[in-house]
Image: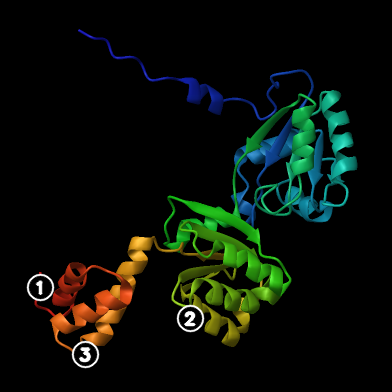
Amino acid sequence: MVKRRAPSRRIARTRKDSPANTPTGTGGTLHVVATPIGNLKDLSERAREVLASAGLVAAEDTRHTQQLLQAHGIRARLVSVHEHNEAERAAEVLQALAGGANVALVSDAGTPLVSDPGLRIVRAVIDAGFDVRAVPGPCAAIAALSIAGLETERFAFEGFLPAKAAARRARLAALRGDSRTLIFYEAPHRLRESLEDLSTAFGPARRAVIARELTKLFETVYRGSLEELMQRARQDADLQRGEIVIVVEGAPSAAQAQAAEIEHVLGVLLAQLSVSQAADLAAALTGASRNTAYRLALKMSGQGA
């Protein structure tokens, strides 16, 4: 009889590790800590323990993070880390780690480094040979994707679109044929212009979702085509308030695009012509084979399976 191996207990042991466990090398550990994007209850137990035990908390905005810490009864030494002072703060973080203290890196909301500062510090810590560990949790991009109802197998996070119209349109033009679901962050005051440019670049019929104020009191999700969402943004002032994530359906494959084009053309032709005539013209106009067009015409006219 072949004996079955006992299930590995490696994951179980890892889950029991202390948040302040000893790093693989000497010195302290840098913990990259995800924090709530709105609802303070979304701070995980592990994140709370890491923040409470950290010798230093490097925060994008110390005032904002102080409110979070106070809400959870945590007292910690805070230093600010933003795009203008990362280089100098990296030296302070390295000094703390060298002294054996653990450091927690947080942003205002969500996962640090995702459209937020922190990359220079993480790189500096890695280059210096200290341990870096993730304390995963909230991320607005992933939260929006999870409820969008669009494809999730392949997606791309594009962050904030350029503020200037010309640069924004150039970026979108480069993404026009991308078949992955696309995720964008957007500032409320630029939402209408961005939706107009998205509709122009990707076509007004492309499906999209706008997730506003995720996990907060006025969380709202809007679904529809880019054209429909663009019109909604023009009329609904509430849509242009708060934190906004836009999730856009990826471009159809070449085969899908051709099938949609044939169906559209046949829909117009069958209203005036016979199945055979409509199939001939549709094949000539779209480049599809005559057999393909004819089978679809039969189906659309109710004569085929």
Q: Give 254 or 39, whichever is nearer the viewer.
A: 254
119 up-or-down from 98: above or below: below
Q: Nearer the viewer, mark 2 or mark 1?
A: 1
What amino acid type should be assigned to the residue bearing mark 3? Ala
Relative side of 104 to 260, left or right:
right
Residue 185 quadrant: bottom right
51 up-or-down from 156: above or below: above
Residue position marked by numbered label 2 in the rendering: 228
252 up-or-down from 275: above or below: above
Residue position marked by numbered label 1 in the rendering: 304
Q: Position of residue 28 (x, y in %)?
A: 77, 25
Residue at image point 65% right, 40% down: 47
Gap in Å between the C-alphas at discs 3 and 2?
27 Å
What amino acid type should be assigned to the residue bearing mark 2? Glu
Gap in Å between the C-alphas at discs 2 and 1?
34 Å
Q: Give 290 or 113, whichever is nearer the viewer.
A: 290
Q: Position of residue 212 (x, y in %)?
A: 58, 68
Q: Give 22 or 255, whichever is nearer the viewer.
A: 255
Mark found first going from the N terminus, 2 or 1: 2
Relative side of 239 to 248, left or right:
right
Q: Nearer the viewer, mark 3 or mark 2?
A: 3
What amino acid type should be assigned to the residue bearing mark 1? Gly
123 up-or-down from 205: above or below: above
Residue position marked by numbered label 3 in the rendering: 271
Residue at image point 15% right, 70% down: 295
Secondary element at tag 3: loop
